[in-house]
Amino acid sequence: MPQITDNGITMIGAGIVGICCACYLQRSGFDVTLVDRGEPAMQTSFGNAGGISPGNVAPLGMPGMWKQIPGWLLDDTGPLFIKGHYLPKALPWLTRFAFQSRTSRVRQISKALLALNSPTFSAYQPLLDDAGVAHLFHRTGQLFIYRTRQGMEKDALTHELRAASGSSVEYLNALDIQEVEPALAPIFEAGYLIPENGHCKDPLGMAQALVKMFLNKGGRLVKTEVLDFVFDANGISGLLTSGGALNTRRVVIAAGIWSKTLCAKLGWRIPLESHRGYHATLEDPQVAIQRMCFPVDYKFAVTPMTMGLRIAGTVELAGLDALPNYERARKMVEISQILFPGLRTEKYTQWMGHRPCLPDSLPVIGPSPDHRGVYFAFGHGHQGLVGASQTGKVIDEIIRGVVPSMDMKPFKIDRF
Ligand SMILES: Cc1cc2nc3c(=O)[nH]c(=O)nc-3n(C[C@H](O)[C@H](O)[C@H](O)COP(=O)(O)OP(=O)(O)OC[C@H]3O[C@@H](n4cnc5c(N)ncnc54)[C@H](O)[C@@H]3O)c2cc1C
């Protein structure tokens, strides 16, 4: 087990959030060790939809959404599903979620999301340039499409929040949609394009390239499971891991959904819930689109990637241990055949991942108020690829002791 120097920092979790934090800290001269029990970026950061949305400032919980919860129990292939036996476990989280979905609170959350997400491209740029993978980012906009105009009008608050954030939006009718993405079936009445958004063509490849760069510059990667924390009079002094003890004076917990268990060891009860999402990546779709498309009625996204066309999304509340229900992935493929005439679906890979979600759609970022040397960077939910780069930047600023480049109050751990 390597021992950490005075200038050392240990990052628990080599998902995209931990990787971005590690890269930023290394750039500032820290001696960084990334610790993960598996290979880097093989959990939630492996199979996301690749969406990078500086203009996405609406939280997940919007006013009135809680009224739909009973309906979410009924169809296990529907866009949002709660497994019946899991409902009692999910209920406390759902109650907090409903409470955070008040209009006044949604406006506050939206401001915090803007601060975290709007710098996403500029915060990624230096890391991508260093790793030589800037070409994996495509800033060709994102297209949101609705079967009916009334469907789009129901999302009025989302549009208002976007407008308030200064994000540019181009509203489209049925003909415009056909012009923007001719591969789509002519079944969408209305939609909009957010030109400043984009996508990553290979989220795993990008994360692996950042790790390679980090290692080439002298960073360390240790494959072990962190089990507990050790403290002395000066704060944290080490970690207990499955591979032995690891001395360290500074630790960042960036373990995605599993941060909940690690925080519990420190006495923090964090309402972190897994929003299980699925993907199907079609190897030979025979359909080409230029940008990420969101058929909003179905709660999934379709993204052109280097390895094929990825259909990803939906939400399932069933906890960490339930087996994946790949019928959900198959259903997205089936719907996509209607959305994209001629789509070839014979060959696809499927996957399920755990989005680490807090009830207010905001992650926890910053120092522990009661454990010297411990910092948090987890809970990025549906937007972890978007938020990872700025999270890395502010974690580095906080640890260096300079004023963070955004207001950190909304992200504090003791807000729950
Ligand atoms: C279907 C789907 C689509 C998505 N689409 C998008 C999108 O378009 N845009 C977007 O921005 N986000 C998207 N997301 C969300 C995004 O993927 C996540 O928010 C993000 O990957 C979370 O990254 P992370 O680093 O926090 O967690 P993870 O990637 O889960 O990494 C956590 C790491 O911690 C390690 N770990 C855990 N516990 C321990 C321990 N005790 N000891 C050692 N290691 C440990 C794990 O092995 C893992 O490698 C999507 C997610 C899903 C499921």
Image (spheres, grey):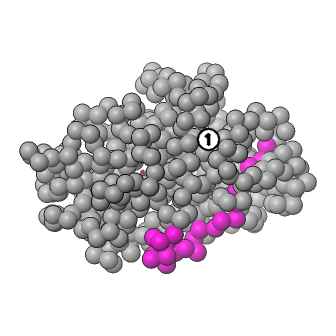
Left or right placement of residue 361 versus residue 245 in this view: right
Number of marks: 1
Quarter of the figure that contains the N terminus: bottom left
User: Quick check: is 127 in the magenta stretch?
Assistant: yes
Residue 2 spot, x, y in % from top left: 16, 66
- Residue at x 48% of width, y 33% of height: 359
Quarter residue 262 falls in: top left
Left or right placement of residue 322 versus residue 259 in this view: right
Q: Residue furthest right?
A: 175
Up/down of 33 relative to 146, above or below:
below
Quarter residue 183 falls in: bottom right
User: Quick check: is 286 in the magenta stretch?
Assistant: no
Pointer 1: residues within 10 angstroms few (<14), some, or many (20+)? Answer: many
Please state which of residues 274 and 285 is positioned toward the viewer in this rendering.
274
Residue 184 spot, x, y in % from top left: 81, 56
Left or right placement of residue 283 versus residue 220 in this view: right
Residue 414 spot, x, y in % from top left: 34, 34
Callout 1, which amino acid? Answer: Ala
Which segment did they paint magenta? 125-146
Please state which of residues 101 and 394 is positioned toward the viewer in this rendering.
394
| Residue where numbered disc 1 is placed | 58
- Residue at x 38% of width, y 74% of height: 212
- Residue at x 35% of width, y 70% of height: 27
Residue 135 spot, x, y in % from top left: 58, 75
Residue 152 visible:
yes
- Residue at x 14% of width, y 57% of height: 247
Up/down of 327 relative to 251, above or below:
above
Residue 293 visible:
no
Q: Under tag 1, what secondary structure?
A: loop
